[in-house]
Amino acid sequence: MTRIRVGWMIIVLMITGCSDKDSLPAGVLSKEDMQNVLWDMIQADQYSAAYLAKDSAHINIRLESMRLYDQVFQLHHISREEFNKSYKYYLAHPELTQTLLDSMQAMGNRLRAENYNRSTARPVSTPPVTTVPAPRPPNPAPRPRDHVAKPLTPVQKADSLRRRKLVVQ
């Protein structure tokens, strides 16, 4: 009798010991799906913090954030309840959460490096500068003068600084 109990205990231990530790309960998002949803939710948070906060006098930031979250859920074809259940599961399992957050950080670093390399890899070509002559103002109408200057004789020249006639000898 004890042999049978020991045999059953060994079989149960083997079955539980050989089970897949990476399997998730039903209704919990996979690591990749959860990573993508969390990434988009973080992006929505950043958008609301950077852009919606500037216009907080006209909109309710909390309602707009909830609307953005709903758009993320629709994008990934999940419900808010599915996300909350998955989020609670991952928080209850720190080893899964750690790998999830590490992979998100690696993805962020990779995207940042790709954007940096893309912007510095090819030289930015500046468009050729075309010089368009500035439009010339119309000729001003002649001003009425109080007196008309008499033409100078070849012997006389005008002093431009003092506006006097000089006699050249």
Image (cartoon, rainbow, N blue to C red):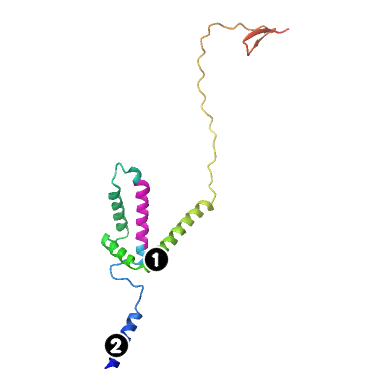
The magenta stretch spans residue 45 = yes
Secondary structure under the numbered disc 2 in the rendered image: helix
Specify the amino acid type for callout 1. Gln
Q: How many marks?
A: 2
Q: Which residue position is annotated with label 1?
A: 98
Q: Nearer the viewer, residue 75 or 112?
A: 112
Q: Indicate the position of residue 50 as horizontal and vertical percent values.
A: 38, 48
Chief secondary structure of the magenta portion: helix
The label number, if any, that marks residue 138 in the structure image: none
Q: Which residue position is annotated with label 2?
A: 8
Q: Indicate the position of residue 52 as horizontal and vertical percent values.
A: 34, 46
Secondary structure under the numbered disc 1 in the rendered image: helix
Q: Nearer the viewer, residue 71 or 124?
A: 71
State the separation of the CA atoms marked 2 and 1. Answer: 36 Å
Please identify the quadrant where the C terminus is shown.
Answer: top right
Q: Nearer the viewer, residue 115 or 51?
A: 51
Please identify the quadrant where the N terminus is shown.
Answer: bottom left
Q: In the rendered structure, which disc, 2 or 1, sits on the residue that comes first in sequence? A: 2
Q: Which residues are magenta?
A: 35-52
Outermost residue to the right: 169
The residue drawn where x is 32% and y is 60% is 76
The residue drawn where x is 28% and y is 91% is 4
The residue drawn where x is 33% and y is 83% is 13
The residue drawn where x is 29% and y is 88% is 8
User: Mark 2 near mark 1, Cβ–Cβ under 8 Å?
Assistant: no
Q: Quadrant of residue 101?
A: bottom left
Q: Indicate the position of residue 129 as horizontal and vertical percent values.
A: 54, 38
